[in-house]
Image: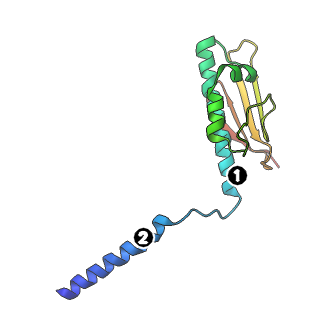
Amino acid sequence: MWKTRIFVSAVFLLLVLGTLPLQFAQDARTSGKDADAERRAVVLGLVRTINTIEVTELSEYGSYAPWPILLAHNQELNGWLKRFYSSGEPNAHFSDMPEILPGWNLRLNVQTDGKGYLLLLNDVGDKTGFAWVSDESGLIRQCKALQ
């Protein structure tokens, strides 16, 4: 009987000790693809934010707005910038198109009647030609240049 208890205790101890290192393990990067995925996720977040702001513009003013008006009407963009953009510059701010942030190009074309828009945002540093595309439908598409 005591052999069984010792055996069960030893197995339990090995299971507990075997899982401890996994709890404290760090997620080490093994390639540059993870850095690309992080950058793309940040750019995607900005596209989502712009889509949300455009919907707000439509409901408040009756039409979608071009980039300069979005900047003037929405402090939400500055909040996004402070929270998610890590350029190392504490005073980073959005600029005019096409390069709204260093290395990020935005094309935001609003229809003349203000009832639609087309958005394309890409990271210039991404050599694959990857970009995010969206429009008034709110769907966000990813695209990659043909090579």
Q: Position of residue 77 (x, y in %)?
A: 65, 29
Q: Position of residue 22 (x, y in %)?
A: 47, 67
Residue type at mark 2 is Thr
Q: Position of residue 44 (x, y in %)?
A: 65, 39
Find residue 19 and name its label.
Answer: 2
Q: Position of residue 8 (x, y in %)?
A: 26, 80
Q: Farthest residue toward the bottom?
A: 3
Residue 47's image quarter? Answer: top right
- Mark 1 crowdedness (10 Å alpha carbons): few <14, some 14-19, many ≥20: some
- Mark 2 crowdedness (10 Å alpha carbons): few <14, some 14-19, many ≥20: few
Q: Residue at x 75, y 21 (%)?
A: 68
* Quadrant in which the N terminus is drawn: bottom left
Indicate whether 136 appears above or below 25: above
Residue 55's image quarter? Answer: top right
Q: Residue at x 55, y 64 (%)?
A: 26
Residue bearing mark 1: 36
